[in-house]
Image (tube, coloured by chain):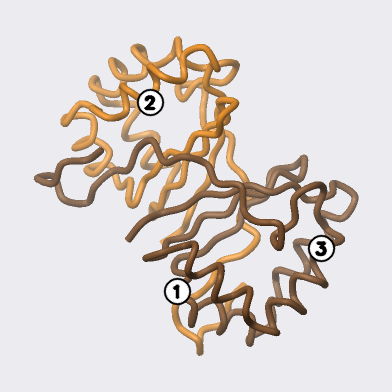
Chain colours: A orange, B brown
């Protein structure tokens, strides 16, 4: 399954509250992510607010489009937008490029 | 299994070669990573050289220490050190903090 890494910027003065909100992500938001193909999805925060997302999906563009069509996502993103500087999740997820992946199978070629 | 995200900085003028080297990571280096507990390990690069690592490990500190004891790692890191600005992998991996993980099980509490 393809792996994706994206980055956003959380406002440094709102980081504590951002973290707190993510301790209790709405169950229906989590269910929507699962239903639209988001797998092994984690968010990581650097002390200056750099936010890194890691997610596996058969087709991230399709998973994103499916989320955007859901009311629960619209409500969640509206509640989260004030926490971001610049690009917000509704603007899109700026992706980094995967340059290495360690294959599990020693006999499988890793690229 | 715990998930970890770290960041380093690749010299922008060496990015192309850095990417090229990671298309052909030595098989013995890949075997060493597997043997020391590095799982689902990926590297992602931003256009300005920000390098994000994502890895799963039962105990990343132990996995790192086990790698540092191996000659193949010493040789690999020596060959890679000139590609980095500031912190190199032998100095350590500056970690970001996981603030969210989407559990696979809808009935499992996500924190």
Where does label 1 land, which residue?
Answer: B37
Q: Do tags 3 and 2 sit on the same chain?
A: no
The reply to whether callout 1 and callout 3 are in contact (CB within 8 Å) is no
Determine the image quadrant of residue A17.
top left
Q: Do tags 1 and 2 sit on the same chain?
A: no
For marks 1 and 3, the one nearer the N-term is 1
Element carrying mark 1: loop
Left or right of B3: which side holds A6?
right
Residue B81 — which label? 3
Position of residue A55 measured from the top left corner of the image (x, y, whole percent): 42, 48
Q: CA distance from mark 1 to mark 3?
A: 23 Å
Element carrying mark 3: helix
Position of residue B76 measured from the top left corner of the image (x, y, whole percent): 74, 75
Left or right of B55: which side holds A48?
right
Residue in the image at 25% along x and 38% along y: B111
Element carrying mark 2: helix
Nearer to me, A57 or A16: A16
Where does label 2 land, which residue?
Answer: A19
Determine the image quadrant of residue A68.
top left
Chain letter of the residue carrying label 1 = B
Q: Is residue A19 above or below residue A65?
A: above
Q: Is residue B49 above or below residue A26?
A: below
Q: Residue furthest left?
A: B107
């Amino acid at each position: 399954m393809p792996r994706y890494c994206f980055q956003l910027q959380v406002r440094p003065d709102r980081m504590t509250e951002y973290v707190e909100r993510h301790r209790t992500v709405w169950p229906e938001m989590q269910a929507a992510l699962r239903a639209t193909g988001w797998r092994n999805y984690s968010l990581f925060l650097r002390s200056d607010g750099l936010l890194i997302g890691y997610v596996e999906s058969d087709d991230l563009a399709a998973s994103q489009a499916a989320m955007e069509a859901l009311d629960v996502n619209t409500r969640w993103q509206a509640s989260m937008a004030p926490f971001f500087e610049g690009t917000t999740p509704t603007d899109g997820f700026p992706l980094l490029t995967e340059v290495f992946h360690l294959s599990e199978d020693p006999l499988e070629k890793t690229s």
